[in-house]
Amino acid sequence: MTVPATTAPEALVRVEDLKVYFPIRSGVLIERHVGDVKAVDGVTFDIKKGETLGLVGESGCGKTTVGRTILRLYDPTEGRIFFEGRDIANLSQKELRGLRRRMQMVFQDPYSSLNPRQNVGAIVGEPLLVHGLAGGSDIDKRVKDLLDVVGLPSGAANRFPHEFSGGQRQRIGLARSLALNPDLIVADEPVSALDVSIQAQIINLLEDLQEEFALTYLFVAHDLAVVRHISDRIIVMYLGKIMEVADASDLYEKPLHPYTKSLLSAVPIPDPEVEIGRERIILSGDLPSPANPPSGCVFHTRCPYAQAERCPTDVPDLRELRPGQIVACHYAEEIEAGTIGERTLAVSSAPTS
């Protein structure tokens, strides 16, 4: 399942038919390859320079794997990853070293992503040492500037991670990611472990940093309310595949895929009259295993509109139904028009092989 990627020069990253499979092995004395966990199964998209691309979906849909594979923290099983037109999917670690400076990551858990044995100055300054960009007093000055940029006092450099709150630790992680002046930052659920009030502060900080340093973000999250405020475009993933791609405003106002509609129906709206009157879509069954995904449309076992004629057997193509809005659903037009018939496929929580 692929969608034609934009070939415009403003595309900083281009992913083509990316697949990331993790082998399943069995046996004690002799290990046998008995299957694969299909974490990412053929995704194609672009990240344009200066934009924030949101990547959302349930836990286990493969969104974090996509982000880490773009940075080559995981090796792709198949597919191509272009960074400014250069395919980096098969580069060696030595060849990747120069690109590491231009691609950084902010991790989900600010408690475990920082070395507890290093003080903040050493944590933030380490990338400069590793890449040979500064040393001695130059590092101290650069660390002080970075801490100031993310809203921490210069005295924080002499303290250790356990002395900070969760929001402050995430600011430290941001300072570390900015040390090498990157072009791309993959933010892997950077606010999910934080209180709601702190989430807003970090989101605002990310937006300010993007404007100041001309950053490009891949913002990975499962909270659609958070993604809406920071993203220019949004990709919705389910079980390793892309379900829908659209501008943020279009996705929230006129979603096309049943899975997107169900996710949005679960987001609370701070208006009692609207909240009471709107339709709730409750998905049936359980999330199938990526080790044995359903045939046809991977969402058909839970889709309220699934039809026996096509959904269990035919893989839907990603189609552009509106300008800039792409969806992988056989019956998206009928669902939008309200002409789709009753569900003709028996509900089953078991995946179909």
Image: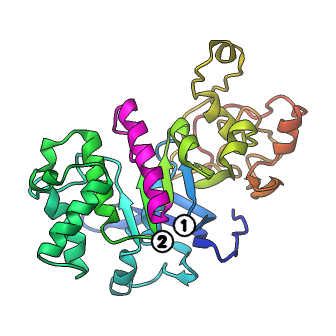
Look at the picture and state if 237 lies above or below 300: below
Q: Residue at 80% of width from left, 40% of height from top?
A: 308
Q: Secondary structure at mark 2?
A: loop
| Label 1 sits on residue | 19
Q: Could you tell me if the residues under marks 1 and 2 are in contact, i.e. CB atoms within 8 Å?
A: yes
| Label 2 sits on residue | 76
Q: Is residue 318 left or right of residue 168?
A: right
Look at the picture and state if 287 lies above or below 22: above
Looking at marks 1 and 2 on the same chain, the residue that comes earlier in the sequence is marked by: 1
Circle 2: residue type: Pro
How many numbered callouts? 2
Q: Residue at 40% of width from left, 79% of height from top?
A: 99
Q: Is residue 340 left or right of residue 294?
A: right
- Which quarter of the figure is the N terminus placed in? bottom right
Q: Residue at 76% of width from left, 48% of height from top?
A: 329
- Extreme bottom residue here? 95
Instruction: Please state the horizontal and vertical placement of residue 90, each as a whole percent of the image.
Output: 46, 82
Q: Magenta span covers which residues?
A: 189-216
Circle 1: residue type: Lys
Spatial CA span between label 1 and label 2: 6 Å
Look at the picture and state if 41 lies above or below 11: above
Instruction: Please state the horizontal and vertical placement of residue 313, each as a whole percent of the image.
Output: 75, 51
Q: Is residue 36 in view from this perspective?
A: no
